[in-house]
Amino acid sequence: MVSWGRVWSGAFAWLAWTIVYGIIGVILIVVGVFVVGGSLNNLIFSSNLTSGHFYNSNLFAGFIFILLGWIIIAIGVIASFFKINSEIISEEVNHSQPIASPPTDYCCKTCGAIVSPNQKYCPECGRQLDWT
Ligand SMILES: [Zn+2]
């Protein structure tokens, strides 16, 4: 059973990664919005067709920036969730492994009673214990 403390620390780690990816994504989106806004501004107010064409490619680049920003946020948030989630799960699996597989060697082969490996005779049925 995973402890609440471990889950909370995982949640905080996820939050920290979300902020990191969020900041990177927001920077890209803001840059994209400024590029789009600037190029639209120039596209509307520019009477020159050649400069209009130049800003049109800037408009496309701006949209790419905005799209990349959203992708980084979405993928970053999901990826960091999976990373922390799998870390917690692998820790839990490692912790519970000794419990999941009991030492079958320390059972009496005749009656199945749990015995310590240094005993020569089973305390339950009295048969000699064979550890070979
Ligand atoms: Zn026995």
Image (cartoon, helix red, strand yellow):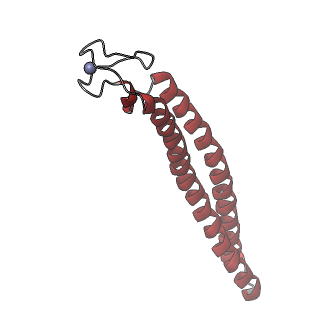
Q: Quadrant of residue 54?
A: bottom right
In percent of width and height, residue 116 lies at 41, 17
In percent of width and height, residue 59 lies at 65, 73
Q: In which quadrant will I find the N terminus?
A: top left
Q: Residue at x 52, y 33 (%)?
A: 11
In percent of width and height, residue 55 lies at 71, 77
Q: Quadrant of ligand 1?
A: top left
Q: Farthest residue to the bottom: give it.
A: 49
Q: 99 or 111: which is nearer to us?
A: 111
How many marks on residues? 0
For residue 24, side relative to residue 10 (left or right): right
Q: Residue at x 55, y 28 (%)?
A: 9
**Whether residue 54 is situated above or below residue 78 in the rendered picture:** below
Q: 7 or 2: which is nearer to us?
A: 2
Q: In which quadrant will I find the C terminus?
A: top left
Q: Residue at x 64, y 75 (%)?
A: 60
